Amino acid sequence: MNRRHEQILNIISSEKEISVNSLSDMLNVSLVTIRSDLRLLEEQKLLMRTHGGACLPSTDDIGHRLSINYSAKQKIARAAAALVEEGDTILLEAGSSVALLAQLLSSRKNINVLTNNAFVARQFKDSPGVNVILMGGMYQKESETMVGPMVRDYLSYYNFTKVFMGIDGFTKDQGAMCRDLDRADVMSSFVQKGKKIYILTDSGKLGKSEVKTICRPEEINYIISDSGVSKDFCEFFQNCGIELIKT
């Protein structure tokens, strides 16, 4: 993905829907170039083309979540990718920043990836150096995530050192939270099995409460976020022994 593609996603994230003509004027490129860009981004499920323009995918679709604040999430994903080493066996849970992390890891060699998300698994389809295990379970169609007891059963067969997860909210008293109960149950199991827990989140979710807690602050090793993390939360993470990485 080039810089112009990122600009297009940022514009559509802000405007929700925009015409080809407007994008051409804003980015100072031809209509043919914009149409080609939109076609490529649609193939990646990052937007939907409309008659004469483009818009965000449906609200619960993973492509929709990828498109929102794309540049910030890309920076978070890059910082997370720097923490993955050759020979690692890692678990990648669902989440837009985690999906971007998977894309960045697709060119790596000698890593093993477990995941409960089909979208994440597909990022490695052309990656000979990455072994991928997609855990089975009840399939949530829009998020492409596997949930339920079968996913938890898979955990007894595998060992992994690093768990990378996205979240929907985080408060000081409750810790990391998820709005989906089935997904939250699976994520809690991942936390219990993993040795190091990495949370990938934009700063807007800090201070936001959601339906169910995934893990307490003391169970988290790293939080990777953007530069908008408040001083108050920076101090809280430090006191909890959480290493904060701001991008």
Image (cartoon, rainbow, N blue to C red):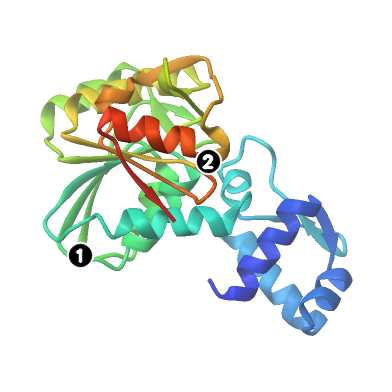
Q: Give, as a three-letter code, the residue at label 2.
A: Ser
> In this figure, which residue is indicated by the disc labeled 2?
203
The location of residue 41, given as percent across then percent down, is: 62, 64
Q: Give, as a three-letter code, the residue at label 1.
A: Gly
Residues packed near mark 1 inside 10 Å, few (<14), some (14 to 19) or many (20 plus): some
For the C terminus, give its image quadrant: bottom left
- Callout 2 secondary element: helix
Q: Residue at x 40, y 48 (%)?
A: 120
Q: Is residue 88 above or below residue 60?
A: below
The location of residue 183, given as percent across then percent down, is: 42, 24
Q: Residue at x 58, y 56 (%)?
A: 70
Left or right: 234 in relation to 243: right
Query: Residue 197 appears in which quarter of the rendering?
Result: top left
> Is residue 123 visible to us here?
no
Residues packed near mark 2 inside 10 Å, few (<14), some (14 to 19) or many (20 plus): many
Of the two numbered discs 1 and 2 on the same chain, state the one appearing first in sequence.
Answer: 1
Q: Residue at x 54, y 46 (%)?
A: 228
- Closer-to-camera residue (116/207): 207
Badge 1 vs badge 2, beta-carbon distance below 8 Å: no
Q: How many marks?
A: 2
> In this figure, which residue is indicated by the disc labeled 1?
129
- Callout 1 secondary element: loop
Q: Is residue 134 above or below residue 19?
A: above
> Is residue 111 visible to us here?
yes
The disc at residue 146 is: none
Left or right: 34 in relation to 68: right
The location of residue 107, given as percent across then percent down, is: 30, 68
The location of residue 138, given as percent across then percent down, is: 41, 24
Q: CA distance from mark 1 to mark 2?
A: 33 Å
